[in-house]
Amino acid sequence: VQLQASGGGLVQAGGSLRLSCAASGSIFRLNSMGWYRQPPGKQRELVAEIYSGTMLIEGSTNYADSVKGRFTISRDNAKNTVYLQMNSLKPEDKAVYYCNADISNNPWDYGKHYWGKGTLVTVSS
């Protein structure tokens, strides 16, 4: 399984960016997809997740308090792709953003987590 993330870059405070992450490989079921971030000198933290119907109501989402109302996670099931629309970006949003997916490779798999390579988001003040 590979997770290919894209969309990071440099943006001014108040601006917007959209991250994308496409999953490919041995995928029977995508149980959830999400984004984590690791700010400089800090631990990795959850940004947002979106769930399939196997875990919660299809399309259910969960956001970190710090991004609620500014970030929106969405998913294209046909493309096995998750998006993160980031609006009203703040300097404290600067981090390496990582895509994560909980994937079942076979019908009998409960699922395991996979990580993509990070993409850097820099917000200038």
Image (cartoon, rainbow, N blue to C red):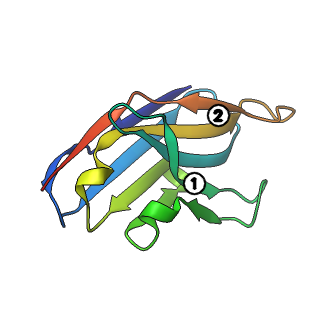
Q: What residue would you read off at disc 1? A: 49
Residue 73 seen in this snapshot? no
Amino acid type at circle 2 is Ile
Amino acid type at circle 1 is Glu
Residue 69 rendering spot, x and y as whole percentages:
42, 74
Q: Quadrant of residue 108?
A: top right
Q: What residue would you read off at disc 2? A: 27
Compared to residue 87, the image places residue 96 above or below, namely above
Neighbours of disc 1 within 10 Å: few (<14), some (14-19), many (20+): many
- Foreground label between 1 and 2: 1
Compared to residue 124, the image places residue 71 above or below, namely below
Q: Residue at x 43, y 37 (%)?
A: 98
Q: Quadrant of residue 60?
A: bottom right
Compared to residue 122, the image places residue 69 above or below, namely below
Q: Residue at x 56, y 25 (%)?
A: 1
Q: Which residue is drawn at 48% across and 46% down?
A: 35
